[in-house]
Image (spheres, rainbow, N blue to C red):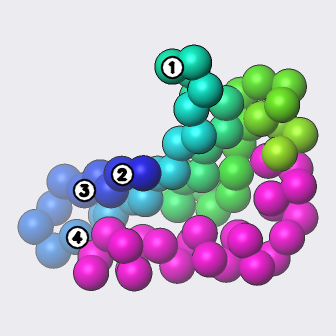
Amino acid sequence: TKCIHSSRDFSDMVYIDNYIFNKDVFIQFNSTVGEYVGYTEHGVFNARNYNNDPNILQSERAQVETYCKH
Protein backbone atom coordinates (compact mmCIF):
# COMPACT_ATOMS: atom_id res chain seq x y z
CA THR A 1 0.00 0.00 0.00
CA LYS A 2 1.33 3.42 -0.91
CA CYS A 3 0.24 7.00 -1.37
CA ILE A 4 1.70 9.14 -4.13
CA HIS A 5 1.39 12.90 -4.57
CA SER A 6 3.34 15.69 -6.22
CA SER A 7 1.65 18.81 -4.87
CA ARG A 8 1.92 20.31 -1.41
CA ASP A 9 -1.84 20.52 -0.90
CA PHE A 10 -2.32 16.77 -1.63
CA SER A 11 -4.97 17.54 -4.24
CA ASP A 12 -3.46 14.97 -6.60
CA MET A 13 -3.13 12.18 -4.00
CA VAL A 14 -3.29 8.65 -5.40
CA TYR A 15 -3.81 5.55 -3.26
CA ILE A 16 -2.36 2.31 -4.64
CA ASP A 17 -2.87 -1.10 -3.03
CA ASN A 18 -0.80 -3.89 -4.63
CA TYR A 19 -1.23 -7.58 -3.97
CA ILE A 20 2.10 -9.30 -4.62
CA PHE A 21 3.04 -12.97 -4.86
CA ASN A 22 6.61 -14.09 -5.71
CA LYS A 23 7.62 -10.48 -6.40
CA ASP A 24 4.90 -10.08 -9.06
CA VAL A 25 1.87 -7.84 -8.74
CA PHE A 26 -1.18 -9.97 -9.50
CA ILE A 27 -3.89 -7.48 -8.52
CA GLN A 28 -3.92 -3.74 -7.87
CA PHE A 29 -6.37 -1.14 -6.64
CA ASN A 30 -5.63 2.37 -7.91
CA SER A 31 -7.78 5.25 -6.64
CA THR A 32 -7.60 7.07 -9.98
CA VAL A 33 -9.05 4.01 -11.73
CA GLY A 34 -11.49 3.39 -8.86
CA GLU A 35 -11.50 -0.38 -9.12
CA TYR A 36 -9.28 -3.45 -8.99
CA VAL A 37 -7.22 -4.51 -12.00
CA GLY A 38 -5.90 -8.06 -12.36
CA TYR A 39 -2.58 -8.80 -14.04
CA THR A 40 -2.66 -12.61 -13.93
CA GLU A 41 -5.41 -15.17 -14.43
CA HIS A 42 -5.87 -15.45 -10.67
CA GLY A 43 -5.72 -11.65 -10.31
CA VAL A 44 -8.37 -11.09 -12.99
CA PHE A 45 -10.66 -13.57 -11.25
CA ASN A 46 -10.22 -11.84 -7.87
CA ALA A 47 -10.51 -8.37 -9.38
CA ARG A 48 -13.85 -9.32 -10.91
CA ASN A 49 -15.10 -10.57 -7.54
CA TYR A 50 -13.84 -7.52 -5.63
CA ASN A 51 -15.28 -5.10 -8.21
CA ASN A 52 -18.70 -6.75 -7.94
CA ASP A 53 -18.81 -6.09 -4.18
CA PRO A 54 -19.82 -2.44 -3.56
CA ASN A 55 -18.71 -2.62 0.09
CA ILE A 56 -15.14 -3.52 -0.84
CA LEU A 57 -14.98 -0.82 -3.52
CA GLN A 58 -16.41 1.83 -1.21
CA SER A 59 -13.88 0.93 1.47
CA GLU A 60 -10.94 1.07 -0.93
CA ARG A 61 -12.06 4.35 -2.51
CA ALA A 62 -12.27 5.93 0.96
CA GLN A 63 -8.64 5.05 1.68
CA VAL A 64 -7.41 8.20 -0.11
CA GLU A 65 -9.00 10.29 2.64
CA THR A 66 -8.61 7.97 5.63
CA TYR A 67 -5.18 6.45 4.96
CA CYS A 68 -3.30 8.88 2.73
CA LYS A 69 -4.49 12.34 3.72
CA HIS A 70 -4.85 11.54 7.42
Frontmost of labels 1 and 3 is: 1
Give the CA separation, mark 3 to mark 2. 10 Å
Disc 4 residue crowd, few under 14, some 14–19, many 20+, Cα 10 Å: few
Q: In this view, does 26 lie above or below 33?
A: above
Please tell me which residue is depicted at 57% across the width and 72% down the height of the picture: 61
| CA distance separating discs 1 and 2 | 16 Å
Q: How far apart are marks 4 and 2 (CA)?
A: 14 Å
Instruction: Identify which amino acid the numbered label 4 is placed on.
Output: Phe
- Of the numbered discs 1 and 3, the one sitting upstream in the chain is 3
Residue, disc 3: 5
Q: Mark 4 points at which residue?
A: 10
Q: Is mark 2 on a helix, strand or loop?
A: strand
Which dot, 1 or 2, sits closer to the camera?
Answer: 1
Identify residue type, mark 2: Lys
Instruction: Give the magenta range.
Output: 47-70
Are the residues tagged 3 and 2 within 8 Å (C-beta)?
Answer: no
Camera-near label (4 vs 2) is: 2
